[in-house]
Image (tube, rainbow, N blue to C red):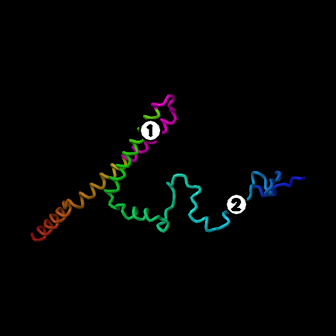
């Protein structure tokens, strides 16, 4: 039985000269995926999802429970910052507990401990940013509710009127 060449086009544009496998292509040119037999199965495919950080979420794909949660989430910036701060503190506490568990093992893995410490540092940086954001929000609200700016405008207007009357 004679082995046929792969024949797929290489980057240079020439046909590949490697021996073909049962599907007619070499191991490097396994052929183009045809996808699922039923195109409807492709919709909502989560095969490549690892953690969901970069997942695109569409409102029409939410479950009933997720829709309820979506409508319960506050859009008030103060509530959001406060909630995120509390979650960050819980995250740090859990990571510290994992470090403690790792250190209590017979042979603790220093790389694992270092990775958790790096993660804690990232969360702490996030906490610092949340604290700054909270301060900015407080300052903005103080300026809005203080009324001192309105008082200053009134004083300046009164001074202009007095000056014009002289």
Q: Which residue is mark 2?
A: 33
Magenta stretch contains residue 5: no
Image coordinates for residue 156, horizontal then vertical, percent? 17, 64
Q: Earlier in the sequence, mark 2 or mark 1?
A: 2
Image coordinates for residue 116, horizontal then vertical, percent? 46, 39
Q: Which residue is mark 1?
A: 98
Q: Residue at x 35, y 56 (%)?
A: 80
Image quarter of residue 93: top left
Looking at the image, the residue that sits furthest to the left is 166
Would you say 118 lies left or right of 127 here?
Answer: right
Disc 2 or disc 1, which is closer to the eye? Answer: 1
Tell me the CA gap for discs 2 and 1: 42 Å
* 133, above or below 56, in the image: above
Is label 1 in a helix, a strand or a loop?
helix
Quarter occupied by the C terminus = bottom left
Would you say 4 lies left or right of 56 here?
Answer: right
Is label 2 in a helix, a strand or a loop?
loop
Q: Which span is picked out in magenta? A: 103-127
At label 2, counting other C-alpha atoms closer than 10 Å, the crowd grade (few under 14, some 14-19, many 20 or more) is: few
């Amino acid at each position: 039985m004679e082995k046929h060449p792969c024949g797929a086009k290489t980057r240079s544009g020439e046909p590949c000269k490697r021996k073909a496998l049962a599907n007619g292509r070499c191991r490097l040119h396994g052929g183009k995926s045809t996808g699922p037999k039923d195109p409807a199965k492709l919709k909502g495919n989560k095969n490549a999802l690892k953690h969901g950080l970069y997942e695109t979420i569409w409102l029409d794909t939410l479950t009933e429970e997720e829709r309820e949660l979506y409508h319960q989430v506050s859009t008030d910036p103060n509530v959001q910052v406060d909630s995120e701060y509390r979650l960050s503190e819980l995250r740090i506490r859990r990571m510290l507990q994992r470090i403690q568990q790792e250190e209590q093992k017979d042979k603790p893995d220093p790389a694992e401990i270092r990775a958790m410490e790096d993660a804690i540092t990232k969360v702490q940086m996030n906490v610092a940013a949340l604290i700054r954001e909270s301060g900015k929000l407080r300052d903005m609200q103080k300026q809005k509710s203080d009324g001192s700016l309105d008082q200053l405008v009134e004083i300046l207007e009164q001074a202009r009127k007095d000056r014009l009357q002289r």
